[in-house]
Image (spheres, rainbow, N blue to C red):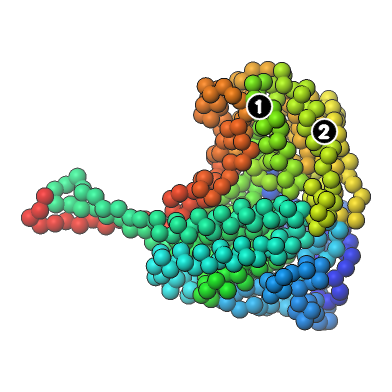
Amino acid sequence: MREQSTGSVGNRPRRQGRSPHTFMLQPAPIPHSCLIFFSADEPDLSSGLDNAKARRDCHQNTIRQTTEPPLSKTAAIMGAPDILKLKNPDLFRDKAYVNGQWVEAKSGKRFDVIDPGNNKAWASVPDMAKEDVDGAVQAAYTAFEDFRKTTPRARAQLLSRWDALIKENKDDLAAILTHETGKPLAESKGEIDYAAGFTWWFVGEAERAHGSVFQGSVPGRRVFTIKQPLGVVAALVPWNFPIAMILRKASAAFAAGCTMIAKPSPETPLTALSLAYLAEKAGYPKGVFNVLPTTLANTPSLSEALCRHPTVKKVTFTGSTRVGKLLAAQCADTLKKLTLELGGNCPFIIFDDANLDQAVEALMALKFRHAGQACITANRVYIQRGAYDKVSAMVTAKARALKLGHGTDPATTMGPVTVPQGLDKIAEQVADAKEHGGKLLTGGQRVDLNEGYFFEPTVIGDCAPEMRVAKEETFAPLLALFPFDREEEAVQWANDTSMGLASYAFTKNVDRMWRLFENLEAGMIGLNTGNSSAAESPFGGIKESGFGKESGKDVAINEYLITKTGTLTLEDHF
């Protein structure tokens, strides 16, 4: 993504890759300190660069200023780009949203949004910076003073209207999402269906947040609790599922009575702005929802301003473990409440007695959805020796059948990776696996297609624990197969990571299934399913995959509430 101050949208030089959430908390000469979903001790994707080249890359991505009119003024006149073919052109919003107003950055600067399917700029948005933060925070706080007083029923009704508008505009949202992320239209529509589950769920949760009253241990004593909204929330959102991640966070916050400032990833600002437009149409008061798009260059200072602002009472972040730790340190000065959904590197275990058709179908959907760019995707696949050859053949055939292409092509079943840095990562892991004895079963090469960021669906067999693919999360379409013999061996390998987000196991042995549920070190365990995420299910990891829960009954909305205790002494009463 390159910042522009003028010019027409069109071909752009291949952009510097970034993580799903390009979040940095301190200035750095080399912009790679924010890689998503990798262990804290993992080298950065750019670790092979010497400092001189890295600095050149950084310099090429610095802001270019001119005195010519900004691109946004042309885009605003033209309206939604023709490539989107929107039924509701008003859904396309290319300005920041603060206090109910569509605004430019104070600097007047903007940056391009790139389609990863063809490496073309197709829109631009304001490059908000740290000087834009305080106004957004103050607007959110002013709105909070009124919004916190609304009844749970009123908040539920607002969420219900927002939910209906999101579903009504599903096709248009999917078109924008596909051009931002590269995922096929069918997957984009699937993300919106999944995301709308959160708005619908929290319609009910708004009225299910209750306090309690009980008798104390001392005669004449009564104890009672009430729930109150926490305050202004900052949401730092990744690029891989930008609609779902905003709605999972915002729906819980709004149900609780909080207000929010969302900072979308530089790759995917437009879907966030579309959601803000629909929230406005649903009737949310000005200042309740604010969206600040920004470039990678301004991300460190803008994000730090949010983290350190004393009026911001909570930060919710989806991103890498390493950045999550930096974020926690930045928020420590003001003791902000945190929800952190961090690295994955998830294991997927298939036993001899499993329904192999069921296991392989789940594996393919889990691994190759959005070209492998999901925090809960299967990163390490452990297959018991008796089923190994059959499963290897099945997944190899299915991987070869996937059709690469632009997400708008109905024939496409797998799109590009969203950032070109992902191409380097998968290529390095493939080379490392082959050097350590891995067998390339299919794929393994970049694909020159429309100048987009494409890599073949890749399967590598006979993988071993010493390979990089076992230690690092790939975030690309690479399926690594590891043979194992005993249950204990599979569990040991599965748990051999600092991460603990999700694990998956397929077996028909009920006793074994229960052992795996208890012994696998992850916050979410898929048992004979690859789909362990839903609005009604608590989502979150353990170990260095973070803390706090998103979605689920009670636990998610409580992340945005305080519990206040009252104690009353009664006279002449038991």
Please tell me which residue is depicted at 41% across the width and 70% down the height of the picture: 150
Please tell me which residue is depicted at 39% across the width and 70% down the height of the picture: 149
Circle 1: is it few (<14), some (14-19), or many (20+) Cα within 10 Å? Answer: some
Asked whether residue 5 is in view, the answer is: yes
Residue 398 at x, y = what percent? 80, 36
Is residue 67 positioned above or below 242 on the image? below
Q: Amino acid at mark 2?
A: Ala
Please tell me which residue is depicted at 35% across the width and 55% down the height of the picture: 210
Residue 278 at x, y = what percent? 60, 70
Which SS class for mark 2? helix
Q: CA distance from mark 2 to mark 1?
A: 18 Å
- Residue located beneath label 2 in the image: 397
Say which of 97 and 207 sits in front. 207
Residue 36 at x, y = what percent? 69, 49
Determine the image quadrant of residue 29.
bottom right
- Residue located beneath label 1 in the image: 355
Please tell me which residue is depicted at 56% across the width and 39% down the height of the picture: 524
Upstream in sequence: badge 2 or badge 1:
1
Asked whether residue 313 is in view, the answer is: no
Q: Amino acid at mark 1?
A: Asn
Residue 448 at x, y = what percent? 92, 50
Q: Residue furthest left?
A: 572
